[in-house]
Amino acid sequence: MKSYLTILECTYCFAEYPSDELINLCIKCGKVLFPKYDLNLIKKELNPNVFSNRSSNMWRYRELMPIIKESNIVSLNEGFTPLIKSSNLGDKLGLKNLLIKDETMNPTGSFKARGLSAAISKAKELGAKSITIPSAGNAGGAMAAYGALAKLDTYVFMPKDTPLANVIETKAYGAEVQLIDGYITDAGKFSQNLVSSKGVFDVSTLKEPYRVEGKKTMGFEIAEQLNWTLPEFIIYPTGGGTGIVGIWKALHELKELGWIKDPMPKMICVQAEGCSPIVDAFLKGDDFADPFKNPSSIASGMRVPAAIGDYLVIRSLRESGGTGLKVSDEEMIKGVKYLSENEGIFAAPEGGATIAGLQKLLDRGEINENNKVLLLVTGSGFKYLDKLSPFFED
Ligand SMILES: Cc1ncc(COP(=O)(O)O)c(C=O)c1O
Ligand SMILES: [Zn+2]
C-alpha cells in the first residue's frame, strides 16, 4: 500500500510536526493538528474512478488516509453507509431534493466508528499499548470495540447519565469504564489524569490528529455517492465538532485534487438549545466559544459544553456561508418521530436535530423547495431507549 501522508500541521499557528510519532496537540500553541497528504502526487497517480471497485467501507479511500501499513488497519467495515434520497420526508417538508446519509448503519451504531477505526489503527501503527477517552456515549462504545480488536488496554470515562446501552456495550467490549459525576469535560479531566500518571495515549476528539481522518470519509462518500457532485446544504448535529470539521476537510482535499467542480455546500451546525456554545459564539461573531454553563440535552452527543475544535467549526461555517442553529429537545424528538414514520430510520436524538434544523431554515426561507439538502443522521435510536421511552408512552 502506497502512503501519501506527509506531515502534521497545526490548524492555528501552522507549525509542522513529523507524522511518525505519537502526538496530541500543537506543542507551540496547544491547538489541533491535522494530517497533510501529497495531494499533487495523488492527483498525478490516481483518479476518482479507482474507488468504485473497492470494498464498501471507508478504507476504500486509503490513499487519503494516514495508515502506512495495511496490516495496521483495525476495521469492522465502517463507512460507505447508504446515502438515501428521501422517499416521504422531502414531500412532507416540501423539498424535492432531500438526501439522508444514514450513519445508523455503522458498526456500533454511529458515525463514531469511523473516527475510532482511524485513530486506533494509527495508534497501533505508532506503537500505543493503551488508550483513553472521555465520551458522551457513542464514542466510548466505538473506542472499546476497536480497542478490543486491536488488543489495546482501553479506558473510557463517561458522565454517569450516559445512555445505558453505551455503558453496557463499552463494558461488554472489555474496556475499563468509569462513570463520572459531571459532564464530558469533567470526564476529560479524569482521562487526562491517566495520561499524566500512566502514559496512556489520549484519543479525545480532536486532541489527537487522526480521528478526524476517519470522520472526513463521510465527505468523500457524499461526493462519490452523488457521482462527484455536492449538495447545497449539509446539516450536522454538533457536539465536539469533529464530524462537521472532518467533512469540511474532506471537501477541501477533493477540491484541491480537482475531483469535484460544484460550489462548496453551506455547512449548517445544529446544537441543542440547552448546550449551544459554538452556535452562540458564531452568532456573536466570535472565533472561540465560551464554556456553556449547566448544559442539558437528551442528545448526549451534543451535550459538550467546551470543545477544543470550536474555532474549526466556526471557520467552516464562515468559509462556507453556512450558519449555526439551536433546537430544543422537543424539536429533536419530533424529528426522530418524523424520520422513523416517514423513512423507516430510527435515529438518535442527534439525527432528529437535523430535521429540526432543516425545518427552521425552511421557515426562515433560507432553504427553498429546489435546494439539494443533505442531513447527517449520525447515530441509531437503539442506543437511547432509556432516554427515549418517556416520549413513546401510550
Ligand atoms: C449520534 C451522535 N451525533 C452527533 C454527535 C456529535 O458529533 P461531533 O462530536 O463530531 O460534533 C455525537 C457525539 O457523541 C453523537 O454520538
Ligand atoms: Zn500551533
Image (cartoon, grey):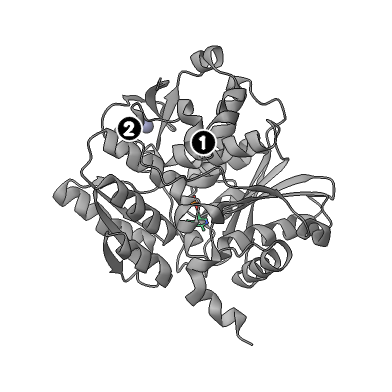
Q: Secondary structure at mark 2?
A: helix
Quarter of image, res 66: top left
Quarter of image, res 221: top right
| Residue 323 horizontal/vertical position (percent) | 66, 48
Q: Nearer the viewer, residue 382 or 244?
A: 382
Mark 2 or mark 1: whose residue is earlier in sequence: 1
Vertical relation: 244 (above or below) 4? below
Res. 130 visible in picture? yes
Vertical relation: 266 (above or below) 385? above
Question: Is the CB–ligand 1 distance for label 1 below 8 Å?
Answer: no
The residue drawn where x is 53% and y is 31% is 54
Q: Nearer the viewer, residue 369 or 326?
A: 369
Ligand 2: image quarter: top left
Give the tally of numbered discs: 2
| Residue 71 horizontal/vertical position (percent) | 32, 32
Gap in angstroms between the C-alphas marked 2 and 1: 16 Å
Q: Nearer the viewer, residue 32 or 350?
A: 350
Q: Quadrant location of the C terminus?
A: bottom right
Tag 1 residue: 55
| In the image: residue 188, left or right of residue 112 | left
Q: Quadrant location of the N terminus?
A: top left
Res. 296 visible in picture? no
Tag 2 residue: 71
The label shown at residue 253 is none
Q: Residues within 10 Å of mark 2 (few under 14, many from 20)?
A: few
The residue drawn where x is 48% and y is 60% is 301
Q: Secondary structure at mark 1?
A: loop
Taking the view exactly as shown, the residue that stands out farthest to the bottom is: 394
Vertical relation: 135 (above or below) 370? below
Mark 2 is on which residue type? Ser
| In the image: residue 361, left or right of residue 66 | right
The residue drawn where x is 58% and y is 53% is 279
